[in-house]
Image (cartoon, rainbow, N blue to C red):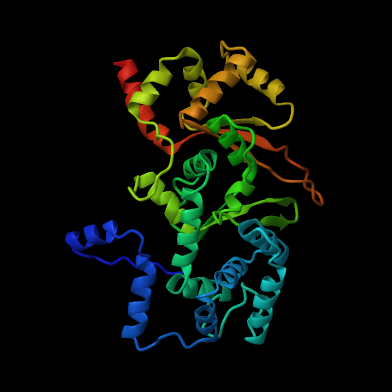
Amino acid sequence: MPRRTTRIPDELADQMADADEIDWSETICRSVRRRLGNPGSSPIQKLVADYRDDINRLWALHMLSHSISTQHVCETMELIFGSDQSDIVDAVETELANHDIDGMYSRTADGYRVGDLIRGAIACNGLADLKSYTKTQIQDAPLKIRKGVFVLSLFLWNRLDGDGATIHPKGVERTWQTYADDTDVEFEDLIARGFAYKKYHDANAYKHWNHLIPEYSLSILNACIDRTPSISFPGTYPGKSTLRELYADDACREVIEWTGGTFASHRAHSEEEYIQNAINEQDISLTVEEFKTARDQLIQNGVLVLDYDPRRRSAGSRSSQPAKWQYRLTPPARNALPKVLLESNA
């Protein structure tokens, strides 16, 4: 979906920021349509307009527009609404077929992808409802769930400008469990609140979960990072003082240095064996347990996330590649680290 930049006076920008409950993209889109004398006459626009007051159908249509399978749309809808929604999903697919809309990657006569057009129509007529519902679900959720949103913001920090972002849930879950000091959390807790859609990537040697964080959730994450007053999330993004304190700790410093200030990885299976190999190869003066304790301390301070790379399976003449845990310094930690290093070398 194309993006346009509009210049507005500072005073107006401040007023818009104060009224953050309004979806300004949707408001501007409607105004443009009225100005062009085009209230929305295409079958897609009419379908979206018909669904405006039916959030279940609107949500199903939005998921389908992202080319998510019917099975995973039904599973996501059931998690969100707490009951079987397959009849609703079937009805939406039937209406799409009745409008000769077949396949989200198919193109119209004008060359536009159908899925893009549907998401564009929803952005102008209903996306704010999905965002409002999800925002309320997250704000009313237990503390451990809101901590999961904070953790997710560290994973997606640099991927917030788009129609959505995909992520493997395994790394988020493990980082979240460590950050919240609670093993009783899982990615489906976020899906159940509308924050993500179940999605499976299936292409030859690459078969794994690749859940989608839709555009309205990216907007919520952006507000989390910007510390928008109307959205409250637990957690503090690490700054120079946090990095200074952790870097002064010998064990934490060795783990940070092992990442090279960006990221490092080891194989996911036989984890302790590969941690020991890393300790030996990098001449790290820690035991495996000391290494893991320092790693967890960095995660609990928002400095490190554990991402999961499923790699590929064997297919044809191509051999498989083992899954890996990737230790990634978070963007705010990477921003603060050079200042701490300069101080330590002064």
Q: Residue at 82% of width from left, 52% of height from top?
A: 316
Q: Residue at 49% of width from left, 46% of height from top?
A: 156
Figure check: 187 above or below 255: below
Q: Where is residue 103 in the image (x, y as percent from the top left)?
A: 65, 75
Q: Residue at 62% of width from left, 53% of height from top?
A: 211
Q: Position of residue 108 (x, y in %)?
A: 56, 82
Figure check: 309 above or below 129: above
**Quadrant of the frame with the C terminus:** top left
Figure check: 88 above or below 150: below
Q: Residue at 63% of width from left, 21% of height from top?
A: 278
Nearest the eye: 90 or 100: 90
Q: Which quadrant holds residue 268? A: top right
Q: Where is residue 286 in the image (x, y as percent from the top left)?
A: 58, 12
Figure check: 332 above or below 49: above
Nearest the eye: 312 or 49: 49
Query: What number of labels is visible?
Result: 0
Q: In the displayed image of the protein, which residue is found farthest to the right?
A: 316
Q: In the displayed image of the protein, which residue is found farthest to the top?
A: 285
Q: Where is residue 188 in the image (x, y as percent from the top left)?
A: 64, 48
